[in-house]
Amino acid sequence: NASFAKMLIVFTVSGGGLVALSEAKSEDGMNIVNSTEANDKKKRVVVLGTGWAGTSFLKNLKNSSYDVQVISPRNFFAFTPLLPSVTCGTVEARSIVEPIRNIVRRKNVAVHYWEAECFKIDAENKKVYCRSNLDEKEEIVVDYDYLVIAIGARANTFNIPGVAENCHFLKEIEDAQKIRRTVIDCFERASLPTLSDEERKKILHFVVVGGGPTGVEFAAELHDYVNEDLVKLYPKVKEAVKITLLEATDHILNMFDKRITAFAEEKFQRDGIDVKTGAMVIKVSDKEISTKEVKKDGAVSTTPYGMVVWSTGIGTRPVVMDFMKQIGQGNRRVLATDEWLRVEGCDNIYALGDCATINQRRVMEDIWAIFHKADKDNSGTLTVKEFQEVLDDICERYPQVELYLKNRKMSSLADLLKDSKGDSVKESVEVNLEEFKTALSQVDSQMKNLPATAQVAAQQGSYLADCFNRMEECEKNPEGPLRFRGEGRHRFRPFRYKHFGQFAPLGGEQTAAQLPGDWVSIGHSTQWLWYSVYASKLVSWRTRALVVSDWVRRFIFGRDSSGI
Ligand code: FAD
């Protein structure tokens, strides 16, 4: 190519095979990187992100017919559920991270990692544009055959003035380390002899915004840290410490069972954590945080603080936003995919984890198409028996529908219909499809997007890897479910999420758990369940050993308070 000013071939040994890394510079000075096996037959898979989704995909990819390039500004995987423990030194930051090169080292698949951040996806020309973290001037263009977007999300500030500038976030390892240093700095500053009591109280006022699982866990951790460790070292300032938890809705942990919410609110009250519900933050200055009462008269109040931790959910990364505009999804919050995790409207691009969601509207259109197909004589009616048969097919393809029926203790669409019409439906009665559509719309409104959790991201990563592992074989022998758009069969079954439950650590060696089947467990024994589940979920034996030894160290010596 005439535009290439320079061509450089580097040979390196990877996974036992000889791999050629070709690097070229375009006229405008951009590096164009390709890595191909000597035989050059491999399909190039580019993976963006080394978080839960990306790492799970890489760990489970076994087919050596791919040439994989991983691009992420972070050369490690971080076990995010233990980030709140890092903020208070219960667990060390190093204990919950595993270098990505370690994770992919022993694989028979050729995997190359670039420490860079993708800033543009060009779906038309199948290229991604990246900027090196280490040298910001270096721009790299990478070609792909398949692109896996797993770049997660960023903290959502809702564009509230002063949040980005003055608040701490809890998304990355660096955030947790920064919080840990700031807590200790606050205690040291408050201990200076020149301060008034008023100033001391202000510096030791810790505000947590967001009553979701992360905000609640952080508030609980901080409370334990202060009461079990810091009060012994800073006895003179202990009376000045205050922790406030602000939540805009009526309750904290409102995605959990009511029993858990009530227990958490009571426990926090007993512990002296000031939980303010119905309080919407409207501004954060460098010294004060302003809130507005959501329900009452909308009264605005302003409180001085020493540190604010912002934990109110997730927002879209700029590169994803830009990409969504390109592909006509500009009005969405996250990338829409089908149930096979393929980005809608794009070829060979997959999106998983926090940056994507399965498009439920399309799912409903598909379900509706299935019913129309079953209505062979176009009469607009089906018998209940026929309904039931179609239902079995739908439940097989769409776990959301099955889940909806289960949640409402229904076993059939006939029950659903009965529910919507308020009377019984007999086997022999024909059911009007238009009426049924109304009933179906209930499913639509109740089918929620999958939650943005590590559980979903990891399951999607391993599902997609499995599809990639069987891609060639399935192209020859497609055995998946029937297509309803066009002819033939899908190569794979759609993604199916299995929920294993959710924890909410509440401090004082107590945890709440909501397990499948709405089984709720709260207390000290659940804390031990939490310890064992999280120890087992850690990504390697090395991190497992480190985390367990951190827990033991904390039991014996308490948390470290040096703020390093
Ligand atoms: P991430 O894990 O965030 O990974 C994104 C990756 O993309 C990172 O490697 C990042 O460096 C990389 N990246 C970012 N920008 C770019 C770019 N431009 N180009 C290339 N790469 C990029 N979930 C649970 O199920 N249970 C829990 O207990 C739990 N606790 C949590 C506690 C905290 C404090 C937090 C913050 C989250 C918690 N979660 C939990 C949620 C869970 O961490 C996320 O849902 C999960 O990380 C999503 O995985 P992901 O792969 O989509 O994104």
Image (tube, rainbow, N blue to C red):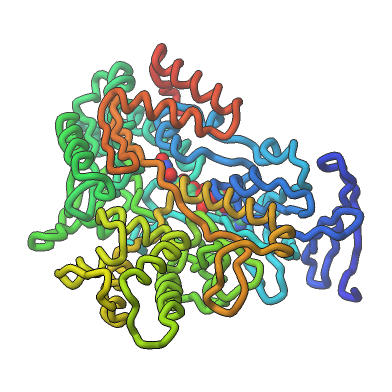
Up/down of 114 relative to 347, above or below: above
Asked whether, in this view, residue 98 is left or right of residue 178, the answer is right
Snapshot quadrant of residue 164: bottom left
Instruction: Provide residue 76's location: percent of width, then percent of height.
Output: 62, 41
The extreme left residue here reads 297
What is the number of callouts on the image?
A: 0
Residue drawn 64% across the image and 43% down it: 59
The extreme front residue here reads 428
Residue drawn 27% across the image and 66% down it: 414
Q: Nearer the viewer, residue 100 or 405?
A: 405
Snapshot quadrant of residue 150: bottom right
Instruction: Provide residue 470's location: percent of width, then percent of height.
Output: 69, 55
Residue drawn 28% across the image and 23% down it: 524
Q: Nearer the viewer, residue 253 or 483?
A: 483
Asked if one can make out residue 199 in the rendered structure from this viewpoint, the answer is yes
Q: Nearer the viewer, residue 177 or 148?
A: 148
Q: Nearer the viewer, residue 475 or 200?
A: 475
The extreme bottom residue here reads 378
Asked if one can make out residue 138 in the rendered structure from this viewpoint, the answer is no
Instruction: Provide residue 220's location: percent of width, then percent of height.
Output: 29, 33
Up/down of 143 relative to 10, above or below: below
Snapshot quadrant of residue 421: bottom left
Up/down of 197 relative to 247, above or below: above
The extreme top residue here reads 556
Asked whether, in this view, residue 324 is left or right of residue 555, the answer is right
Please state, as top left, top right, bottom left or bottom right, where the N terminus lies in the image.
bottom right
Residue drawn 53% across the image and 60% down it: 494
Instruction: Provide residue 245's location: percent of width, then percent of height.
Output: 24, 43
